[in-house]
Amino acid sequence: MNRIDGKFALITGGTQGLGAAIAQRLAENGAAGIITIGRSDEKGKEVAQKITKDTGCKTLFVKTDLPVVDQCRIRCYLKFFHNNQLNYCYLDLR
């Protein structure tokens, strides 16, 4: 995989399986920050904490219903960008 130093990513379905593996791999390859979204609050927070601990890449989780695209956008905005939980307000990879 190519390096993605300094890039920010949003991973859907990042609570398990392929989504979690992609988030982990992006963090290992230089991502500056990752937001994972999914339905399982417990799994999502666990995966995000593990990635942050393993790689040092700030990884955050948003619980949302994936098929409802507007809900995903609104919850990501409100939880992170509006409340300044992240030091960026754009995404490089979606």
Image: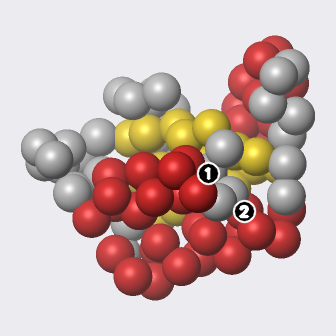
How dense is the environment of label 1, judged by Cα within 10 Å: few (below 14), some, or many (20 and up)?
Answer: many
How would you rate the neighbour count of disc 2 (Cα within 10 Å): few for under 14, some for 14-19, many for 20 or more?
A: many
Q: Nearer the viewer, residue 30 or 6?
A: 30
**Residue 37 shows in this picture:** yes
Provide residue 19's location: percent of width, then percent of height: 55, 48
From the image, tell me which residue sits under label 2: 44
- Marks 2,1: beta carbons within 8 A: yes
The answer to whether 65 appears left or right of 53 in the picture is right
Tell me the residue at 41%/62% (across/down).
Answer: 24
Coloration of the structure image? secondary structure
Quick one: which residue is furthest to the bottom in this view? Answer: 53
- Disc 2, SS: helix
In the rendered structure, the answer to whether residue 27 lies left or right of residue 22 reads left
Looking at the image, residue 54 lies above or below residue 40: below
| Residue 81 visible, this orientation | no
Mark 2 and mark 1 lie on one chain; the one further toward the N terminus is 1
From this view, report whether residue 23 is shown above or below residue 55: above
The local secondary structure at tag 1 comes to: loop
Amino acid under label 1? Gly
Identify which amino acid the numbered label 2 is placed on. Answer: Gly
**Residue at 73% across / 24% down in the picture?**
73
Residue at far left of view: 2
Residue at 39% across, 82% down: 54
Please give left or right for residue 39 compared with residue 46 in the image: right
Question: What percent of the width, then of the height, locates residue 92?
Answer: 36, 28
**C-alpha gap between disc 2 and disc 1:** 7 Å
Residue shown at the point (46%, 58%) measured from the top left:
21
21 vs 57, nearest the viewer: 21
Question: Mark 1 — residue?
Answer: 14
Question: Residue 63's x, y, as percent?
Answer: 83, 49
